[in-house]
Amino acid sequence: MSTTEIMSEVEDKLEMVRTALAGALSENAHACLTCSFQAEDVLLAKIAIQHAPRIPVLFLDTGYHFAETYAYRDRIAQEWNLNLANLLPEKTVAEQEAEHGLLYQSAPDRCCGLRKVEPLFKALANYGVWITGLRREQAKSRTALEESAMFALPGGKQILKLAPLANWTSRDVWYACSKFEIPLLPLYERGYSSIGCEPCTSLPLDPNDPRSGRWAGRKVECGIHIQAAPGN
């Protein structure tokens, strides 16, 4: 496929994303957008603020992110005037490690639960629409991802979860970021393909699996995209 054909295809996909966001960000929708400041999330934030400049942009501030991620977050938030909300766990890194040791080594699911899942689900309870940059291509666990679906939070509240980039490829994301002249997280230049907390992120172990550098292959999801169990 030629560059012209690729760009034409990406333009068509961008128009569909704009249409989806225009509906989600209408006056009647109390929406938020989660952003890890990876490429697809930053691209989606760029498009979203064109429709709703003050949409809340939620960042899971685990305390374990790369220094480069924090610096990049602050740069983009300032340059784009993002309505950024840094979601913090109940305990600081020092408090958690003093009580439980290095949970990211001994019990990574529990660490993610405390530092990602609980703060996010608590915040999402204040919204009716959750916009995310998830893509089916990212992992086998996401191949059935729907662009629009109801999501159950602990306690039973249902919110609309939108993934406007669900059918996008990495190539699509890179071309769109180039089109919008979006500077990307410098860690990509060092070979990282999926970037989370520093202790749990390595260079990809499998070149064909962009998330193979997460949690040293011990798991594939942090838990924020998993439905809460009924009654929880």
Image (spheres, rainbow, N blue to C red):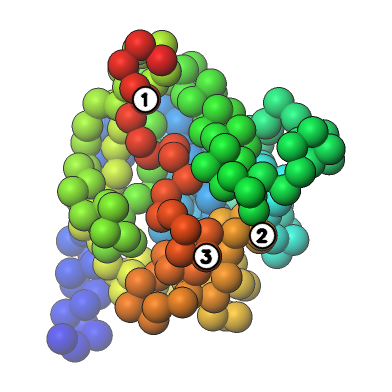
Quick one: quadrant of the C terminus?
top left
SS assignment at label 1: loop
What residue sits 19% from the left and 72% below the top? 8
Measuring from the top left, give residue 123's x and y in whole percent.
54, 23
Amino acid identity at mark 2:
Pro
What residue sits 21% from the left and 36% below the top? 148
17 vs 65, nearest the viewer = 65
> Does residue 232 appear anywhere in the picture?
yes
> Nearer the N terminus, badge 2 or badge 1?
2
Q: How crowded is mark 1: few (under 14 residues within 10 Å), some or many (20 or more)?
A: some
Which of label 3 and label 1 is nearer to you?
Answer: 3
Quick check: 91 above or below 109?
Answer: above
> Does residue 81 appear anywhere in the picture?
no
Question: Marks 3 and 1: CB-CB under 8 Å?
Answer: no
Measuring from the top left, give residue 75's x and y in whole percent.
69, 57
230 vs 150, nearest the viewer = 230
Whole-angstrom CA distance, mark 2 to mark 1, is 26 Å
Write down the residue under mark 3: 216
Q: In this view, does 106 lie to the left or right of 31?
A: right
Write down the residue under mark 1: 228
SS assignment at label 3: helix
Q: How crowded is mark 3: few (under 14 residues within 10 Å), some or many (20 or more)?
A: some
Amino acid identity at mark 1:
Ala
Q: Is residue 218 left or right of residue 75?
A: left
Q: Residues within 10 Å of mark 2 (few under 14, many from 20)?
A: some
Write down the residue under mark 2: 199
Whole-angstrom CA distance, mark 3 to mark 1, is 25 Å
What residue sits 37% from the left and 25% below the top? 228
